[in-house]
Image: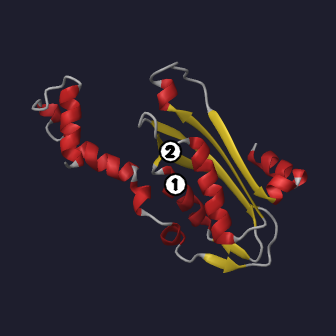
Amino acid sequence: MSLEKNYTEILAEIGEDVNREGLLDTPKRAAKAMQYLCRGYQQTLEEVTNGALFSSDNSEMVLVKNIELYSMCEHHMLPFIGKAHVAYLPSGKVLGLSKVARIVDMYARRLQIQENLTRQIADAVQSITHAAGVAVVIEAQHMCMMMRGVEKQNSSMVTSVMLGEFRENSDTRAEFLSLVN
């Protein structure tokens, strides 16, 4: 059964008239939107980084802040929206700037929980760059908590993953966190 047909069934099950003028093309649009929102499943790390790894003598922290992200909670299929801060300590190679954001997008555009998303981004940056350390912090607001359930409008969730020097060296970790804040 196609995604479009599934959306037609969902509309009928919630009590809508699927033949109502405003809903005639909704299943097609919803299917197309879901495919777009979950396009990360069709991407690989190699495709999104596209060989943009460059030799560099720099061993100082590289930080890309405030990368907006849009993802879907795997528990309720509702959006969570936020920003990611990604840093790494190069060890001979630096990654093209836009590729960090593309890595965030690739993993965010899958059904997710924020904890796993944070880990996936850190592991991906580590595996591509072989950095001496990687740090990722994500702060996001979850519609599954805002629109339903406890309906808390001002809550946000913060997750972090520290690898290598960011985990082992408190000064490096503190520098990263001060730059993020």
In the shown orientation, is residue 15 left or right of residue 122?
left
* Quadrant in which the C terminus appears: top right
Q: Mark 1: which secondary structure?
A: helix
Q: Is residue 109 above or below residue 143?
A: below
| x and y, in percent, of residue 119 in the image | 63, 51
Which residue is drawn at the image coordinates 52% and 18% (left, top)?
Answer: 150
Which residue position holds label 2? 112
Left or right: 31 in relation to 164: left
Q: Are marks 1 and 2 in contact (CB under 8 Å)?
A: yes
Classify mark 2: residues with Cα within 10 Å, few (<14), some (14-19) or many (20+).
some
Residue under label 1: 107
Q: Earlier in the sequence, mark 1 or mark 2?
A: 1
- Locate residue 138, reporting x and y percent: 64, 44
* Residue 116 seen in this snapshot: yes
Q: Nearer the viewer, residue 21 or 133?
A: 133
Q: Amino acid at mark 1?
A: Tyr
How many neighbours does mark 1 have within 10 angstroms: few (below 14), some (14-19), or many (20 or more)? many
Q: What percent of the width, then of the height, locates residue 34?
A: 33, 47
Rounded to the nearest angstrom, the CA distance separating label 1 from label 2 is 8 Å
